[in-house]
Image: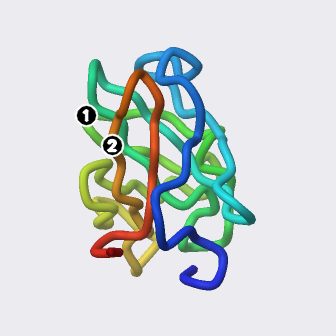
Amino acid sequence: MPRLAPADWVSLGAVEDFPEGKPVRATAGELAVVVVREGDRCHVLAERCAHLSGRLSEGSLVEGCLRCPWHGSTFRLRDGEVVHGPATAPQPVMEARVLSGHLEIRLPAAG
């Protein structure tokens, strides 16, 4: 992921472009991500499932988690940890912030 993901803050667009409670696909450079907005907070994970690359933007939200539509792997939004397999590796999570109504992301612990 580090070769594709931005090391510095990159805008994904206006927060209002991400409907609350619905996974939405976006791109940051060459990296596809899925954004889930919960009120003023946005969770951003790598879009392709760590298990077999299912599109998490087509998944469903279940109790603070995102479930892959292909095989049901379920990841916690806040940290990408596996709640239910078959995935065994956590889903990569991006650091997110909102500035002037725009969602920005970067690799965790960058800068």
Q: Which mark is residue 63?
A: 1
Check the image and report above or below for 106 versus 69.
below
Give how far apart the Cα atoms at labels 1 and 2 are. 22 Å
- Across and down, in percent, residue 23 comes to 53, 33
Query: Of the residues tagged 1 and 2, which is closer to the observer?
Result: 2
Task: Say which mark, if any, is on residue 108.
Answer: none
In this rendering, the answer to whether 52 lies above or below 46 is: below
Which residue is more in the foreground, 96 or 64? 96
In the image, 54: left or right of 87? right
x and y percentages locating residue 40 in the rendered image: 27, 22
x 41%, y 60%: residue: 94
Amino acid type shown at disc 1: Glu
Instruction: Report the coloring of the rendering.
Output: rainbow
- Residue closest to the far right: 30
In the rendered image, residue 57, in percent from the top left (x then y), is placed at 62, 41
Instruction: Give x and y (percent) for residue 20.
Output: 42, 17
- Residue at 28 percent across and 18 percent down: it is 39
Q: Quadrant of the C terminus?
A: bottom left
**Which amino acid does the dot numbered 2 rest on?**
Arg
Q: Quadrant of residue 82?
A: bottom left
**Secondary structure state at the residue bearing disc 2:** strand
Is residue 78 placed above or below 42 in the rendered structure?
A: below
Where, quadrant-wise, is the N terminus in this rendering? bottom right
Which residue is labeled 2 in the image? Answer: 97
For mark 1, does the 10 Å Cα neighbourhood hold few (<14), some (14 to 19), or many (20 or more) residues? few
Q: Secondary structure at mark 1?
A: loop
Give the residue drawn at x 44%, y 49%: 44
Q: Image height check: is 110 above or below 59?
A: below
The reply to whether the C-beta atoms of the residues labelled 1 and 2 are less than 8 Å apart is no
Q: Along the line of sight, which residue is nearer the eye, 61 or 31?
A: 31
